[in-house]
Amino acid sequence: MSRMMIAVVVFACVCQTHASCKEPTNDLASGQREFAADLYARLASMKEGNIFFSPTSIRTALGMTYVGAAGNTAEEMAKTLRFSMAPDELAGPFGELIKRINSPVMLQKSEWIDDMMKTSTVPAYELHIANALWMQQGYQFKKEFLEQVQTHFQARASDLDFAQSEQARQVINKWVEQKTNNRITDLIGPGVLDALTRLVLTNAIYFKSDWAYQFQKANTRTEKFHTSPDDSVDVEMMNQTHQFRYMEDPDVQVVELPYVGDELAMMVILPKRDLADAEAKLSPSRLDEWSNSLAFRAVRLGLPKFTFTSEFELNEALKAMGMPEAFSYNADFTGMTERRDLYISAVIHKAFVEVDEAGTEAAAATAVVMRTTSVPMYNDLVEFFVDRPFIFLIRHNETGEILFMGRVKDPRG
């Protein structure tokens, strides 16, 4: 059965009165890896246990918001989100990057229908990126901002009456549920929207694919997973032996598990010592170093099945990463509106992931509130047995864009 990965980002903007040398798309993808590594470090320090998030989803929604930023607020957001372009320059290249990620190779599929062999072409994977703007009816947004977001981010624009907050909340939550195959429900809770809400920006990423080399369920068995040096739990460990891209250094073992079509892959990073040591050394350059060192080896792989949900309030992490003004009364979003009366009051991210023999299924959602004020014989076999905490990420191979990222301390969730 196919598996899928989904991410959604929701930005709620509330109003309250108060007294390039590289190709642009490549530059954006490079900056995204820096943002992903930085945000991972912040989230890892904020929360114990498993974590999972979508840097692509978060950055896309923040990217739409950045298009409407100005002054020092825009400068801080550019630094934090690793944008090298001005707000009025971002939308076009960002839209092109989305198109590159969302252009899977086509594969031939043959099946018997009415005693005849039918052949068709199907995409190797599905990756649908959807954006929407939910605007307070009667509130004036700049035409240029709306055109940029609608044209390049392909964002659908709809009017809502946020004074009817419960009705507005249900409309947006229903959109989120539909775009995440009902994995993310009730994203925006009661009380988040009110009569001061002026704009909600939503982003959804839907990814569906099988492993290129699936695990056989008959080879899954109960094994010990060491959650700490002194404690262990029983988990369902998937097993297979195959040629995978692999590397190791004194600190980690790394294996890359491709999805069908070889355009997307999961990278599993297994620390040789403790997880904290590997996390301390995690950086874009280190990720690139590991990726560039991968080479095909025969790998005897043991990987636990896991399912869990993560939820974060991202205000403090984003402030610490360099964009505090966007959350203050001094915020400048005059690229959106003539009135300087918008600021971000809350950023919430929620994500779900499931990994099993067939592949991966995941969903993620972020709310940002802006408020006014089989086993053949192999030689030289490498053992990669994931029986302790590890880091994983799913990326687009051509651009290096990290779609999802997380760590597993306990596969049971």
Image (spheres, rainbow, N blue to C red):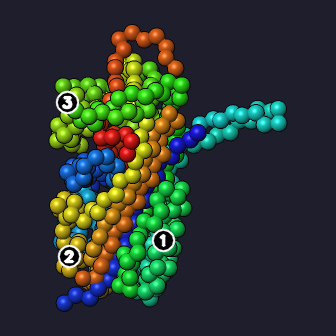
Q: In x, y percent, where is residue 62?
A: 33, 64
Q: In x, y percent, where is residue 7?
A: 43, 55
Residue at position x 45%, y 53% in the image: 363
Q: Amino acid at mark 2?
A: Ser
Q: Amino acid at mark 3?
A: Arg
In the displayed structure, 51 sits above or below 88; it is: above
Nearest-to-viewer mark from 1 and 2: 1
Mark 2, residues whose alpha carbon is within 10 Å: few (<14), some, or many (≥20)? some
Q: Nearer the viewer, residue 95 or 249?
A: 249
Q: Which image quarter holds the N terminus?
A: top right
Separation of residues labelled 3 and 2 (CA atoms): 42 Å
Q: Amino acid at mark 1?
A: Ile
Separation of residues labelled 1 and 2 (CA atoms): 25 Å
Is 340 on the left or on the right of 181, as rendered? left
Residue at position x 31%, y 49% in the image: 51
Circle 1: element type: helix
Q: Nearer the viewer, residue 262 or 180?
A: 180
Q: Nearer the viewer, residue 159 or 386?
A: 386
Q: Which image quarter holds the C terminus?
A: top left
The residue beneath circle 1 is 172
The residue beneath circle 2 is 328
Q: Nearer the viewer, residue 57 or 148?
A: 57
The residue beneath circle 3 is 273
Query: Which circle's residue, 3 or 1, is located before the other in the chain?
Result: 1
